[in-house]
Every structure is written in structure tokens, then in C-alpha cells.
Amino acid sequence: MPTPTSAPSPGERTPFLQRDSWGASLARTVVLFVALVCMVAFAVALARVTLVPSPASTEMIHTNLEPGSSIRAYLDQPDRFSILQQVGGNVLLGMPFGVLLPMLFPRIRGLLRVPAFTALVMVLVEIAQGLIVEGRAFDVDDVILNTTGALVGYVLAGRRLGHALHPRRHHWWHRWTRRDTPPQAMTVTDDDRPSPASAAAAGPATEKKPAAKKPARKAATEKTAMKKTTAKKTATKKTAAKKAVTKKTAAKKTTAKKAAPRRQGTTDPGTTAG
């Protein structure tokens, strides 16, 4: 399942290496290629340092499963250069993990994932040393020092390089620690922003406020009320039309009754002769 990512906030610029322009794509490809070459070179160097047999050390080495035992033995040595070589060398051996892993593998980024992955790899290397390589043995303190180096490398450089190359992941705790825009929100980069001349020609921009959606029940109630009002108006019009027709008919009848005696008086010959 892919890890969700969070888009930058409206006031935050998109890193150059994450943009869609051809220049950013080319720079991203070059950076990833250099990181891949460095990882291959580091893997070769790690194999030569840890998996090369050392027959002269067969009688001096022993398996160490007690955390801190070898580190105390290193610190008890009188020679400071030897202490720096043993402790500092193991720490430096793990630092490339913390720098290169976030760049090449986005899903391994994180303050816990990088040390955990480094510890897993170094445990496998130490097991191979103890089982296969002559003159070497498993030492849990070497794993601890290598993991510490990976954590230091991630804090110093790996975290920033990973954020520059890949979008930030959205974790469940971000809903309380920060307010990010949803992944579907579009971000405005420097390339997408209008120039000052075009902005001046376009005039002041007016923001359109989205219309608030009414609840379904309220909309249905309003629709029913409109239908009732329309039906009342229609009934009122019909009643008024019927009354007008009734009045008109009554007026015609009244006029006809008044006109009937007059006609009889003008047309009766017996009445005029007497």
C-alpha cells in the first residue's frame, strides 16, 4: 500500500527538485544517479572492510553478544588513536546509510526507519562474518555503533536531502502537529504565478466564495413550500376568473330583462290605438 504524501501548505514553496520543469527533472536525475553511484561504492567498501578474511586475528577475536562490552574494551585502551579508529571508524561506517537511504528509498525515510534498516543490514553482515569469514566474529557493539552513525548521518544531511527530492509523507499524528492541505490541493509555484505586468493588466482579482450547501431536509421543505404557494396562486386565479365570468353573465341577464319591456311597449299596436 503506497504511503500517502502531503502537499506543501499555500505559503510554502515547492522544492526545486520536486517541480515538473525540465530543468528540475534533469537535476533530480543527476542527483539520484550520483547517490546511486555512491551507494554502490559504499557497498563495495563495506564488503571489503567487513567480509575480507583476517587469518592473523583468529586467536584474538571472539563472539560478543553483550551490548557495551567491546565499547568498554575500546575505551580502556591507552592509545587514543586506537580508540578513535575503533569507535569512530564504526560510526563513520554507518553514516552513509543515513545519508543515502532517504535519497534512494523514500519509504525508508524517518528517524526510526533509517536506524532500523541499518541495524538489520549490519546484523546480517555480522552474522555472515561469524559464519563465513575467517578471522572475524559477530559483535553486537559494531551493530550499535553503525546504527548510531546512520542516525547521525540522517540528522545531519539525510533528512534534508530526502525532503528536497521527495514529497513529505502524511502520518496520522500530523493532524495534531501541523495543518497540511489535502494531497489533492494544487500548489502554486513560482513558474505558475502571473507576472506583475499581467497582474496589473488583469486588474484586482475578485475572490469567489463558494456557495454554502443547504441541508437536504431544508431544501426539501423549501421546495414543498414553493409548490404549495404556486398551487394557492393558481387556485386564486381560477376563482377570480370564475367570479368574473359569473358577474359578466349576471350583468348580461340583467340587461336583457331591462330591455324586454321596452321592446314590448314599442311594438304593441293595440296599446297605441286606444
Image (cartoon, rainbow, N blue to C red):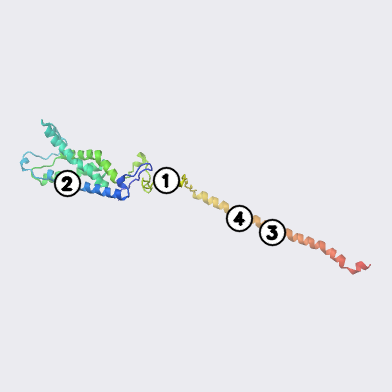
Residue 18: x and y, percent? 31, 47
**Precedes in sequence: disc 1 or disc 3:** 1
Q: Is residue 253 above or below residue 115?
A: below
Q: Amino acid at mark 4?
A: Ala
Mark 3 touching mark 2, by CB under 8 A?
no
Crowding at label 4, few (<14), some or many (≥20) Cα neighbours within 10 Å? few
Name the mark on residue 41.
2
Q: Which residue is mark 3?
A: 242
> Mark 4 or mark 3, which has the lower sequence index?
4
Q: Are marks 4 and 1 in contact (CB under 8 Å)?
A: no
Residue closest to the far right = 274
Q: Earlier in the sequence, mark 1 or mark 2?
A: 2
SS of the residue under disc 3: helix
Q: Circle 4 is placed at which residue position? A: 231
Asked whether residue 70 is in view, the answer is: no
236 in relation to 58, above or below: below
Residue 214 horizontal/vertical position (percent)? 50, 48
Task: Kindly identify the residue that appears in the image at 69 percent across and 59 percent down.
Answer: 242
**Left/right of residue 133 with respect to residue 169 in the rendered view:** left
Give x and y (percent) for residue 262: 85, 63
* Nearest-to-viewer mark from 1 and 3: 1
Numbered mark located on residue 197 in the image: 1
Q: Tell me if mark 2 has few (under 14), some (14-19) or many (20+) residues whose alpha carbon lies within 10 angstroms of its own.
A: few
Return the disc, 3 or 2, that comes first in the chain's sequence: 2
Q: CA distance from mark 4 to mark 2?
A: 85 Å
Q: CA distance from mark 4 to mark 1?
A: 57 Å
